[in-house]
Image (spheres, rainbow, N blue to C red):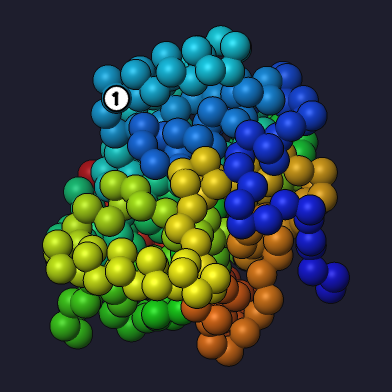
Amino acid sequence: MTRIRSRFTSRSTALEVVEGTDLTGRRAVVTGASSGIGVETARALAHAGARVTLAVRDPRAGQRVAADIAGTSGGPEPDVARLDLADLASVDAFVGAWEDPLHVLVANAGVMDTPFGRTAQGWETQFGTNHLGHFALTTGLSGSLAQAGDARVVVVSSSGHAASPVVFDDLFFERRPYQPGLAYGQSKTANVLFAVEASRRWAGEGITANALMPGGIWTPLQRHWPAEMRAAAEEQARRAESAGLFHMKTPAQGAATSVFLAASPLVAGVGGRYFEDCQEAEVVERLDGIHGVVPHALDPDAARRLWDVSERLVASARAAA
């Protein structure tokens, strides 16, 4: 299987990726589009002509972003809809209100390194929000994605996936000590596995799904880090940049790979893969810094098992409600 390559680099921006691309007539949903790379992902898709819906927890913040995007894109103001991925009732309300074919779904929202907590359904916060919330959303919208005929699901993962496979025997840290980094890593592995299995199941309906690592970006995602942890990470990043080994991206650069997967003709019909810097990542046993994807994130057997487990969890939660 030939790795997908492009002319873009780690310094390319989302707007550069869509330059010359016409998405007129296509509907797109971007979750978590009120801050960070979600804003720039939505901006670039709107700039290319897509009708974008910002799916956000805080509609007022979403409205401010929508007005800003309309001012910079020259197009109509994006729609704004409330979506709280940590509450299945909110996910189901969003799905129930959606009526049109859906061409692009960018599963961008997420939380990282949170203190131990539970979603409205009692699921560990990071796995429940980052994976199960998006799982319920995407499967709920699968009919609309199929109607599009050539839909793309874009799942924002992370190099953090290397920290942990999906631990099926203890998804919610009920029998092992809670570690925020491991919980985040498990959820990010789940994001990739979801893309693998969604592509396998839905390819016949014209739906493809791919996962990505956006890069190192300072965004509100790091808000749960202690001050000393943030300071150490910033110093490490400065040293790596000085040595020419790494550079922190702007949000516009961090959104580039999401937009590449949502819009580029190079990935038309391609699914179940993991990308970084607008290139398909190399499968490695150990990451080179933040680069590469480890085998446990692409394991088709784990992907099938995760899908089945996720279906049961979501169905059980709905039945209990």
Question: In this rendering, does residue 273 appear at all?
Answer: no
The picture quadrant where one finds residue 285 is bottom right
Q: Residue at x 55, y 81 (%)?
A: 288
The residue pinned by badge 1 equals 61
Viewer-closest of 68 and 263: 68
Measuring from the top left, give residue 86's x and y in whole percent. 27, 47
**Disc 1 packing (10 Å; few <14; some 14–19; many ≥20):** some
> What kind of residue is marked 1?
Ala
Q: Is residue 32 left or right of 102 when viewed as pictured?
A: left
Numbered-mark total = 1
Res. 45 in view: yes
Residue in view at x 49 percent, y 20 percent: 69
The residue positioned 61% from the left and 57% from the top of the image is: 10
At x 73%, y 26%, the residue is 23
* Towards the viewer: 251 or 187: 251
Q: Is residue 246 above or below residue 108?
A: below
Q: Is residue 193 left or right of residue 202?
A: left
User: What is the quadrant of residue 149 in the picture?
Assistant: top right
Indicate the position of residue 95 as horizontal and vertical percent values. Answer: 45, 32
The image position of residue 17, as x and y in percent, is: 69, 40
Q: Under tag 1, what secondary structure?
A: helix
Task: Quarter of the image for the N terminus: give it.
Answer: bottom right
Quadrant where the image shows the C terminus: top left
